[in-house]
Amino acid sequence: MEETSKNTDGGIGELNFEFFEKGKDDSDKEFASSVKNILILVKDFYGADCAAVYWFNKIKQGFKLLAASDDERIGEYAERFPLGNDYASTVCLRKNAEIFNISSDKDRELLGHFKNDSNVKSLMAYPLLFQDEVVAVVLCESKTLNFFGTPNIYSLKVFAESITNYIR
């Protein structure tokens, strides 16, 4: 994307976040499609059930679904949700990747990115950083408890950096 962007949507630095509100430009649709392809690779690489990227808008203090790995999800994703006390928000605020195991109803309540109840039991989340600010969060999910481990976080960094490099 151009370095001199029309950044009016609460983005940071020199990124153009307008498409996340409008989604009409062909290059922006191509970007979302490319991210979806990366998510399919992420899902297949880990043997996970689903992967998604949520864009973070710092000014609006909320997330918007950019892309998911496929249509057969393990729950219905929310198109938008506010920064709060959920797992994606935790990773966003800490600027640090984390693994969460969901074994109780209390844990399940922290899956803020689902519209309804899901059968996610393990979640790996990685923040996408641009100029030291979180611009998105990659989520990788499994129906199996304790599915992800620390080595998975390190390898997810490669996929996350691929998306970040595409943004630049």
Image (tube, rainbow, N blue to C red):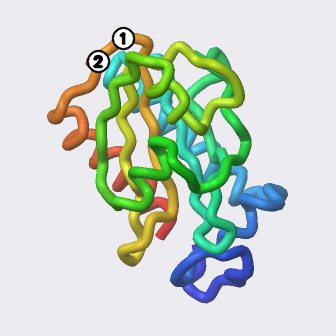
Front residue of 32/112: it is 112
| Mark 1 vs 2: CB contact within 8 A | yes
Front residue of 64/110: it is 110
Q: Residues within 10 Å of mark 2 (few under 14, many from 20)?
A: some
- Hey, which residue is sitting farthest bottom in the picture? 4
x, y (%) of residue 165? 41, 62
x, y (%) of residue 65? 65, 45
Answer with left or right where residue 145 lies relative to residue 33. Answer: left
Q: CA distance from mark 1 to mark 2?
A: 5 Å
Residue 96 lies in what quarter of the image?
A: bottom left
**Looking at the image, residue 39 lies above or below residue 158:** above
- SS of the residue at dot 2? loop
Please state which amino acid type lies under the numbered disc 1: Thr
x, y (%) of residue 56? 57, 60
Q: Which numbered disc covers residue 165?
A: none
Residue identified by numbered label 1: 144
Q: Residues within 10 Å of mark 1 (few under 14, many from 20)?
A: some
Residue identified by numbered label 2: 147
| Residue located at (34% from left, 55% from top) | 161
Residue 83 lies in what quarter of the image?
A: bottom right
Front residue of 97/87: it is 87
| Residue located at (71% from left, 83% from top) | 6
Residue 43 lies in what quarter of the image?
A: top left
Please state which amino acid type lies under the numbered disc 2: Phe
Answer with left or right where residue 119 lies relative to residue 6. Answer: left
